[in-house]
Image (tube, rainbow, N blue to C red):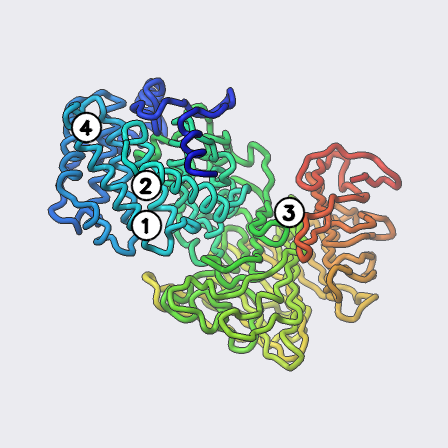
């Protein structure tokens, strides 16, 4: 799009949907970039109402009433004092609009004029230097003051103020262009570019500056073509992770201002409006953001007011429920919370809405992503599991190929934390994660200082996944992730396959983690890692004497099928180079060889409740390398079988294990005390039989998670071909007549077929 074409779009309002969520005004109409005069009655009702929005309004008024000390130096205007004053100026200007308080409006105008008259914008940005965070507060505050204080600004003073705002725009543009983040492809550039766009939107109707068109079109280009497409996926997943998701605030505020002034609407396509959907799944039942990568240890402050914008756009009642439950109001800007609040939406628990308990977020289309799973919503002691692999540069996700996390009964048994700080050579390296490392680990070995670990290679594939209600299955191929891009000539592993099963319904949640790895054609030392909050461990890791991790209210026991006598090391690791030191337990099971396998099962039980039996399963006929487990608990018995894929894309061979027969790479069948099948999992297979009865069959193969309440079916994935999954086709047996069915994420009505099977 040329600059002239862009300006024509801004000049002539586009065709707008009748059900749009925003009011369109002409540029130069004030107020207009956040709300219009016609929307003030709704804001006044919001302020005088009840709940979180009304509480935010009370905070806005307290913020505005505090003493306003003008900065005595440019350094103060850049730093915390300046940020606080800029937030106070916004609050005061908003109170003037909502309550028509002339006195507070004049105080705001005095601050507005004083800062514009006393702070040189070029000197300001020279002082900012590389601190891109410090570029946003004044441009946005100026924009809102100009938009909301117009009736109080004398006509003879407007030209001088407008010229000062244009000078700030010029200085911010030049400053941004001088840094590596100028194109806003990452969160760093999104902050100044988005804030600049908000300022430009505010003065769009009045500015006649010769560079205005260039500034505005460049901001829009960078946000619409760089930041949103490169950083966000439509599912709501942010490339940088949830700790950086709220940096879409400025780009979203700018994009909203553009459409309110009659320009193009890019909000719906941004993916950022769906950020709360992602966070709702990654947020653990007991609280805390699931620790994937280097930016997840933020607690409740990961919830930001801008998420309310997307909640309002999408009518996300479950998102609003989650926000109200977990947001930390002491850390949130009350002005933004008040302005983004969705008036007509009522919070509803995801449990009440019967929303899926698991979701696979594909961050790299068709190739890889994150599976987040739990057994139920609205229960702080629910069980939760994550499995991650991706096909992209590391950024802030770090070296996590085929990494996993596991919590049960509110206890974080398998976890991840940043053991090493940003400046440490091992920050983000493989040794921080629950994966299999080779030798001494430390990849990426030659990572540049402060590179956020992005010299690592994360070119993994999610070869199979089914997000279920009864259980979840996933399999990743991380061989290319073992090539260290920071070392010239480093090669991928020959194979690095991990299959996981999360059995989450019933009294004893458990996970199966099975690995088949070969780094090279020579003997290597392999170390299977499990980080835990527990500081001590007991047991030997065998079926007779599993490893035991004791939590406050529950325990987790880990038994290895392969190796059958695990050589383990357990030590307490103390964090290095981080602000708040912590300790984690690290369990390592080591093997030496050319090609090695690991197959382990970890089951949890509440303290004082019976422990589930973890047993070696029957011998597997069909291949010598398969593993089988039996888990027995109150009212259930599970038989699990795993085999690895010998050749890419060929799947497994037909196996027989007791009453179970399958060619799946992972399979599980649950029976009750009467021997009836009450649930099963088929992970990447064409057939599953139990006791001579077919449970699932498909010519092309698929994955199935079948429970009595819900059954989910997913078609075969094609990540190595960079192609979308094939549709699920085949027949399955529903565990109960009332079982509801989903196929490829869509709810469908079961279609009766032969032998009591249902066609999918």
Q: Categorize mark 1 by other alpha carbons within 10 Å: few (<14), some (14-19), many (20+).
A: many
Marks 2 and 4 in Cβ contact (< 8 Å): no
Q: Is residue 373 visible?
A: no
Which of the two labelled residues, at mark 2 and mark 4, occupies the earlier sequence position? 4
Q: Nearer the viewer, mark 1 or mark 3?
A: 1
- Going 81% across and 39% down the picture, which residue do you hit? 759
Whole-percent x and y of residue 544? Answer: 66, 69
| Disc 3 target residue | 467
Q: Are marks 3 and 2 in contact (CB under 8 Å)?
A: no
Kindly tell me whether residue 359 is visible in this rendering.
Answer: yes
Q: Mark 4 points at which residue?
A: 158
Answer left or right for 204 relative to 728. left
Residue 727 to residue 320: above or below: below
Q: 100 or 264, which is in the foreground?
A: 264
Q: How far apart are marks 3 and 4 (CA)?
A: 58 Å
Q: Which of marks 3 and 2 is nearer the N terminus?
A: 2
> Mark 2 = which residue?
196
């Amino acid at each position: 799009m040329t600059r002239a074409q862009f300006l024509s779009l801004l000049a002539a309002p586009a065709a707008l949907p009748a059900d749009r969520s925003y009011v369109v005004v002409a540029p130069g109409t004030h107020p207009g970039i956040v709300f219009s005069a016609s929307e003030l009655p709704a804001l006044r009702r919001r302020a005088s109402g009840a709940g979180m929005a009304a509480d935010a309004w009370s905070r806005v008024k307290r913020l505005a009433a505090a003493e306003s000390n003008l900065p005595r130096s440019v350094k103060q205007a850049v730093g915390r004092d300046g940020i606080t004053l800029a937030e106070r100026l916004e609050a005061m200007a908003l109170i003037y609009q909502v309550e028509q308080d002339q006195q507070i409006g004049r105080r705001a105008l005095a601050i507005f004029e004083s800062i514009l008259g006393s702070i040189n914008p070029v000197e300001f940005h020279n002082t900012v230097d590389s601190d891109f965070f410090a570029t946003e507060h004044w441009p946005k505050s100026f924009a809102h003051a100009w938009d909301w204080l117009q009736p109080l600004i004398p006509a003879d003073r407007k030209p001088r103020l407008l010229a000062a705002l244009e000078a700030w725009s010029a200085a911010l543009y030049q400053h941004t262009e001088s840094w590596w983040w100028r194109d806003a492809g990452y969160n760093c550039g999104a902050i100044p570019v988005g804030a600049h766009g908000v300022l430009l939107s505010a003065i769009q109707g009045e500015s006649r500056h010769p560079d205005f068109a260039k500034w505005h079109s460049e901001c829009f280009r960078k946000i619409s073509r760089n930041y949103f497409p490169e950083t966000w996926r439509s599912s709501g997943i942010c490339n940088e992770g949830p700790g950086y998701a709220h940096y879409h605030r400025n780009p979203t505020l700018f994009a909203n201002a553009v459409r309110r002034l009659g320009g193009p609407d890019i909000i719906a396509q941004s993916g950022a409006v769906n950020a709360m959907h992602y966070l709702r799944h990654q947020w653990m039942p007991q609280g805390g953001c699931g620790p994937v990568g280097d930016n997840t240890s933020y607690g409740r402050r990961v919830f930001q007011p801008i998420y309310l914008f997307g909640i309002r756009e999408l009518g996300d009642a479950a998102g609003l429920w989650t926000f109200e439950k977990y947001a930390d109001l002491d850390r949130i800007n009350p002005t933004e919370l008040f302005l983004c609040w969705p008036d007509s939406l009522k919070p509803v628990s995801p449990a009440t809405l019967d929303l899926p308990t698991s979701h696979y977020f594909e961050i790299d289309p068709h190739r890889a992503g994150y599976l987040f799973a739990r057994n139920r919503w609205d229960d702080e002691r629910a069980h939760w599991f994550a499995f991650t692999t991706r096909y992209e540069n590391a950024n802030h996700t770090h070296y996590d190929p085929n990494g996993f996390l596991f919590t049960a009964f509110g206890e974080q048994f398998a976890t991840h934390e940043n053991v090493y700080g940003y400046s440490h050579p091992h920050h983000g390296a493989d040794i921080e994660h629950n994966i299999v490392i080779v030798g001494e680990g430390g990849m990426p070995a030659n990572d540049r200082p402060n590179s956020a670990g992005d010299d690592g290679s994360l070119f993994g594939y999610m070869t199979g996944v089914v997000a279920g209600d009864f259980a979840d299955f996933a399999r990743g191929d991380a061989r290319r992730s073992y090539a260290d891009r920071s070392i010239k000539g480093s090669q991928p592993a020959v194979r690095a396959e991990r299959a996981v099963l999360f059995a989450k319904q019933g009294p004893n949640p458990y996970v199966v983690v099975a690995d088949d790895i070969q780094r090279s054609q020579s003997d290597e030392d392999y170390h299977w890692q499990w980080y835990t909050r527990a500081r001590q461990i007991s047991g030997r890791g065998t079926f007779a004497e599993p490893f035991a991790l004791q939590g406050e209210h529950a325990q987790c026991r880990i038994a290895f099928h392969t190796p059958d006598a695990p050589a383990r090391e357990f030590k307490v690791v103390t964090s290095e180079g981080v602000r708040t030191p912590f300790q984690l337990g690290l369990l390592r099971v080591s093997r030496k060889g050319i090609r090695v396998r690991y197959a382990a099962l970890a089951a949890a039980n509440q303290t004082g409740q019976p422990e589930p039996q973890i047993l070696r399963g029957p011998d597997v006929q069909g291949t010598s390398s398969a593993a089988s487990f039996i888990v027995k608990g109150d009212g259930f018995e599970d038989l699990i079988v795993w085999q690895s894929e010998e050749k890419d894309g060929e799947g497994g061979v037909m196996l027989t294990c007791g009453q179970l027969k399958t060619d799946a790479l992972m399979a599980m069948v649950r029976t009750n005390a009467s021997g009836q099948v009450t649930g099963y999992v088929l992970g990447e297979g064409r057939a599953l039989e139990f006791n001579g009865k077919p449970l699932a069959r498909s010519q092309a193969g698929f994955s199935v998670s079948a429970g009595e309440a819900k059954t989910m079916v997913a078609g075969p994935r094609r990540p190595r071909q960079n192609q979308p999954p094939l549709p699920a086709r085949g027949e399955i047996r529903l565990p109960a007549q009332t079982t509801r069915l989903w196929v490829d994420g869509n709810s469908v009505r079961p279609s009766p077929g032969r032998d009591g099977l249902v066609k999918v």
